[in-house]
Amino acid sequence: MADYLNIQSIHTMKRSILFLALFLGGATIKAQVNLEYYLPDNISYNVSIPTPEQFTGHEVGEWHLTHDKLYFYMIELAKVSDRALWEEYGRSHEKRPLGQLIISSQENIRNLEELRQQHLQLCDPSKSEDVDISSMPVFIKLGYGVHGNESSAPNSSVLTAYYLVAGEGKQIDELLDNAVIMIDPSLNPDGMQRHSTWVNFARSLNNNPDPSSWEFSESWPGGRTNHYWFDLNRDYIMLQHPESVGRVAAFHKWKPNINTDHHEMGANATFFFQPGIQSRNNPLTPPENQELTAEIGRYHEKYLNAIGSLYYTEETYDDFYVGKGSSYPDIHGSVGILFEQAGVRGHLRETPGGSLSFSFAIRNQFTVALSSLEAGLRMREKLLESQRKFYKDALIQSEKHPVKAYIFTEPTDNARVSEFIRNLLRHQIKICKLNRDIIKDGTQYKAENSFIVPLSQPEYLFIRSLFEPVKEFTDSTFYDISTWVLPMSFNIQYTGITSLKELAALTGPEITDPPMKQGQLLASEDAYAYLFEWNEYFAPKALYLLQKAGLTARVSTREFTCDDGSLRKSFSPGTILVPAHGQLMRRDAIYSLMDSVANDCRITVFGVKTGLTTEGIDLGSNAFNILKKPSVIMLTGEGTSSSDIGEIWHLLDTRFNIPVTMVTAARFANVDLSRYNVLIISGSPDLGASGTENIREWNRRGGTIIAYKGGNTWISRNKFAELDYIPPVVPDIKEGIYINKSVNNQVHQIPGSVFETVLDLTHPLCYGYTRNNLPVFKRGTSVVRINSNIYNNPVRYTENPLLSGYCTEENIERIKGAAFASIHRNSIISIYDNTNFRAIWYGTTKIFLNALFFGQILGN
Ligand SMILES: [Zn+2]
């Protein structure tokens, strides 16, 4: 078969331009870029379609496109061409549009909905058998720049769009007749906007390729992440951000056969395309997927050879974690392909291999889009057939699997189980209600708050990846985390059902929405006081709303039972008391505020008529501690971890509506700390002697310090607390050969695993928890021994701690019985591991919020 493109001819005449771009570091901007440098010259282009330069005012690669220019160019192409339409699927946190330019032949675009419906039938084993794939188009999604500062990716997307919309002739027609192509030009618009602003404003007219140049030192935290500094290329499972929610919905709407994911790596590298490291593939992904990836790779090989670019495969990257843009498709019957181009992060940059230009990087990205399109065209039937087979096989395999379904419950916190269900539904996972109360493996599953996920459904493999703990691995190195057992991160009780008969007897109706409990106020307007418990997820939001309104609230540190004739109920430690009297607000206003807070936060608020209880402490007891409204300052900037800070910021801002003042180390010494009563330190920034002494003095006067993860090094170094770190395991290597050095050195890493802790439920740091075992996430090898004061160790690792993920026996020994969190004098709270990981650890965020709200009563 003839080459789809006469690629040898494309680039011969452009060698001279490439030479200029690569070797004339001092050349002016204009000399480096030219549309012809990128585009195949063996086809003609429709002159009525605007080129990127005509629309944006500069050539591709001359300046970095800002997101708005990129977006409006796509919109323009959709407007002027009947081959293209723009489909918006969401808005970023900063309200930038997310979407894709869908390009195909005029006829396909006219019949697009029909083609889509037909295509989706391939993924439904009950309908796929009779689908005729011989004349169906292949669906190809090209995804760019999930990391916003990997700019050659989105900057190349305009070339691909122009090529497909303006290109004319037989080759283009053949492609568009047989393919529906979706260009998602920027998967992370907010990050792209930050980065493009930086590199454009820091550049000179005369390119300066000196790597020390300011242009290459993007300001902290850089444009890689989204608005809250999350890595969106880890959010495909978690779906905690609008970018990923929309993108995954679009994935399931179209189920593309090929999904490209265009990235950048370090400037000194070359170009990577998948397949990645074979031994590190996720074992649940069918091997056929890697065979298709390798076959598609032969097209990249051919195209990159033609332009002489260096490249590599089967190293560095893996598809073990299925929550990335290149791996999520693989476990959904599609083929995800990761591309990594050496990143310039500017315009022209010296590297040991010669000068690297932005335009050269863009051309590589554009070239592998062309090779992916040709692969899609030539492998069309194979890809469609593979997709059909994937879903058919899923059902067959599910019949052989010993577990037939998972059953799960959360009896005391509706919001948490609702969010868990919301996540599963977004992945198109079928969930049913439990139709009667049962006890299984010692746990009670009540019909009202328990659910069933049957495994006999198209998402069988993905469900297993979310529910099955894993402790056996074929490789000891991981590009990302080693486990992501979703019920554990939500602290939800679950178990497997192995009998089909039992499953049939227990399965109730399917649910299509999260079962959201409505908030309620059970009180009369003349209530003496209001009470609400701390176990519900949004209880901290309720407390903050009441404190913000000026009400004084207290927390109980003991159990008690109320019985005033209309209400009889026992309350746990951590219950919040708001007296109706003695407040700076009228009683009727308090009543209506309680009503709206209960509704907003989906909690139950109880009213009582008397201060006397029938058991335990009375409402006026000293065992109710008055709470000050948290006023929070958090260190940010260089020296802190943007992901840890971003997770805290996102947690407080988006879920609990609690403002946090973020201050950099450089400005910290000038801040008046008396405005705040909680300080969060993550990382170990240099605050200077005066900044450190200010904190010490403020802490002595009653300020709470939350030392979070790396912040514990800071409090230890500055003698705020004595921490007893357990030395890391040194690999015991007595023999070995040089080539295995890096693997051997990594063997004792903890790449991200789940461990079990035991809670002291009477301790304020554990208020709201109802079971004394809690799964936690741990990444990194730092381990701290428990405090010598036994009452100051409310969250400890158990004696048999590993629940799921990779961890060597030597590290398990270190972790056994060690501290997850501990308390020191003067309300200093250490949280050693991540309670807020990727915003999905709903099970452990309460520990963090307890430190924030109740740290003030831990001043022992
Ligand atoms: Zn990347």
Image (cartoon, helix red, strand yellow):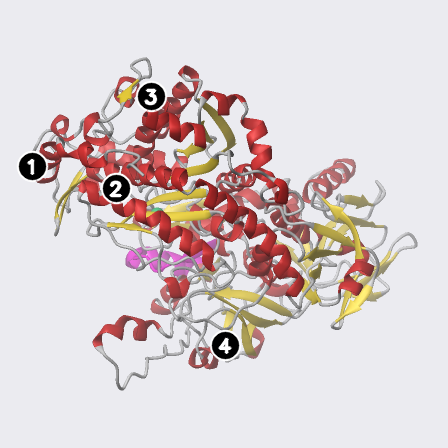
- 833 up-or-down from 288: above or below: below
Q: Which residue is identified by label 1?
A: 24
Question: Which residue occupies the foreground of this view, 578 or 197?
Answer: 197
Residue 112, which numbered label?
A: none
Say which of marks 4 and 2 sits in front.
2
Kindly identify which residue carries mark 2. Answer: 303
Label of residue 166 in the image = 3
Q: Amino acid at mark 2?
A: Tyr
Could you give the CA–CA distance between mark 4 and mark 2, rounded to whole angstroms? Answer: 54 Å
- Which of marks 2 and 3 precedes in the sequence? 3
Amino acid marked by disc 1? Leu
- Look at the numbered disc 4 and give the secondary structure of its residue: loop
Mark 2: secondary structure: helix
* Residue drawn at 34 percent across, 32 percent down: 157
**Which portion, as a residue range, is magenta?**
678-698
Mark closest to the chain's N terminus, 4 or 2: 2
Q: CA distance from mark 1 to mark 3?
A: 32 Å
Label 4 CB less than 8 angstroms from ligand 1? no
Q: Using a 10 Å C-alpha cutoff, classify the residue at mark 2 as few (fewer than 14 neighbours), some (14 to 19) or many (20 or more).
A: many
C-alpha separation, residue under disc 3 versus residue under disc 2: 21 Å
Give the mark, 4 or 3, whose residue is nearer the N terminus: 3
Q: CA distance from mark 4 to mark 1?
A: 58 Å
Q: Which residue is mark 4?
A: 818
Other residues around mark 3 within 10 Å, as few (<14) / some (14–19) / many (≥20): many
Residue 523 seen in the figure: yes
Say left or right for 619 vs 489: right
User: Would residue 695 be counted in the magenta stretch?
Assistant: yes
